[in-house]
Amino acid sequence: MAIGLSREQAPPQAVEHEPVRRRRRPVLVAVIVIAVVLVALFVGWIGIRAVLARQQLEAAQPSASAVVAAMRSGDVAGAKSAAESLSAHAAQAASLTGDPIWRLGEGIPLVGPNLAAVRVVASATDSVAREVVTPLVGVSATIDPRSLKPTDGRIDLARLAAAQPVVAKAQTAFHAAAAGVAGVSTASLIEPVGTAVDRLDSLFAQSSPVIDALGNSTKLLPGMLGQNGPRNILVVAQNPAELRATGGLIGSVALIHADHGALTLQAQEAGTSIGPWPTAVSDIPDATVGIYGPLVGRYLQDANYTPDFPMAATTIAAMWERAHGGTVDSVLTTDPVVLSALLKATGPVALSSGDTITSANAVPLLLSDVYARYPASSQQDAFFSSAAAAIFTKLAAGHLDSGKLLTAFSAAGTSERLRIWSAHADEQKVLATTTLAGALPVSTPQAAGIGVYLNDATGSKMDYYLGASVSAGAEVCRFDFRPTSLVRVTLTNRAPANAGTALPKYVTGGGTYGVPPGEILTRVVVYGPAGGLLAGTQLGSDPVRIVSGTDRARPVAVVPVQLKPGESKTVTVQFLNARQVGPGLNVATTPLPPNAGSTPDVGARTTVARIAHVCDSRVK
């Protein structure tokens, strides 16, 4: 008889786990191997696609250059072919950097920002190729300046108006792509990627004025030239031999009538024949009158003492309407320097006086020689009028190089010698965003908007001999970290030593306004940043009594400077930039007169030198 426990009654037996552990090791190893393989594949996938994307972007660069070259030469077929190549390469680069795996990699520390930057560069390039270059090439024949030059006094506006929606859409796409690249921080990027971002950002900055000029032209020109009804354009010729803040004394005014692109010169008058009026013809703010005097709203020649071109243009338009009736739709200013550039497009123009005016002799002829030849102002006015009429006739007839004409107008805007104001609110809104607006300088939290303007007080044409240079700098000098800005303006009388007797009385002023013949009296007007404070003013090393005030929340200092032939003096003005947190500067100036006898490049802006600002006790 067997004695024992049943299976159910027997104690539980130990379970052996070792075989299980042995089974798990291969699983763990397999998981690790798979993970390594996946990481390798992940890295390899991104690495290979990064190399391929870089190749595509590099291949796109010659195509982009080819597009620009073809459009400049008028080769529409070549531009289209190059645009297709550019678009193909850019699309490939965007595709290679836009998949989910690439986006997943952007979350990896250190590596991720570089991947994100490459994707943004590729995407921006693709957007510009598809949404900017290709559409613009498609309408290039329509917007080509060669197709827009006048024929028998008429410009075909219908083609320009038809291209406007395409150009506007391209302009919007361009700025969207530019904003994407500008938003990439290069601080944590490796050198090749950071360089690529900076290069593309710089390219956007260089191209932006061209794209905006094209977009704004298609928006503005059809309406301003009478596509939707007749328009009256007042062309104001400024004479920098007698300076005003916006460029020069208003020597003559011409009314051009535009009707569906047909341009006719309807009236022309000397500036001295319009007005004056006993009271202001337009609403001039008390602050402006306090700085420049009551004549700003009463005399045409003084309307542009203020550098605020929209205000000056409004006053000029009101004066013309008061004198002649009718309506002025827009005001455009120009000067002999711009005229010299336009003459490169038209070629020499024969005048009724027997002279031939050219790009080389326009400046000395109109700013100096005419005064030596014709002592009477009526004779001078007649000469200026005949010259303007002859040049307009040649321009309107279309006898010109359209490419050079476009270059001349573009350069005139860049150098701030061309200003445009429109009485139509929608057009003025567009103009306000351009270099043509001539508004007071704008400040930002990082940069103080500074203005340096010159107004003649000699009452003569001696500014033909005035040399001027402007320099500025900013520094943080205070414990509250508010920066201060320093502006220096140096003026030189370059007239010959015997100018008082050798030059015509009309040029020297003959002492009529209390300035000895041969000397130059200039009012230097310096605007500080909006919300800022005037901290100090000097003439040379000495404090000086000035006229000061506030214009549109900007502190203003007006310093008179009188110079004998050969003499130089420097005005120094200091401001507290109360609303700024950085020492940046944005300096606007009056377009300076050319050096005596020279013909300056119309596209050159007045150079503002950078200087070190040494803090002193006044601003601390």
Image (cartoon, rainbow, N blue to C red):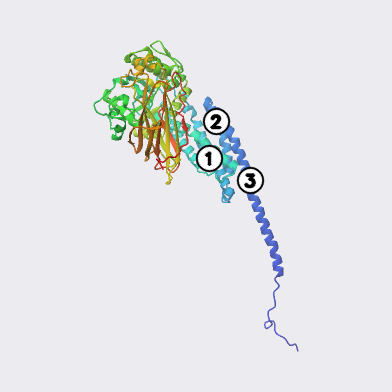
Residue occupying image coordinates x 70% and y 63%: 25
Mark 1 and mark 2 lie on one chain; the one further toward the N terminus is 2
Give the labeled residue for mark 2. 67
Residue closest to the far right = 1
Residue 210 higher or lower than 119, as above or below: above
At which x and y percent is residue 145?
46, 25
Q: In which quadrant will I find the C terminus?
A: top left
Residue closest to the far top = 354
The answer to whether 589 appears left or right of 85 in the picture is left
Q: CA distance from mark 2 to mark 3?
A: 31 Å
Give the labeled residue for mark 1. 124
Judge whether residue 331 can be spotted in this image: yes
Q: Nearer the viewer, residue 222 or 362?
A: 362
Judge whether residue 226 can be spotted in this image: no
At which x and y percent is residue 561?
37, 27
Q: Nearer the viewer, residue 13 or 176?
A: 176
Q: In which quadrant will I find the N terminus?
A: bottom right
Q: Secondary structure at mark 2?
A: helix
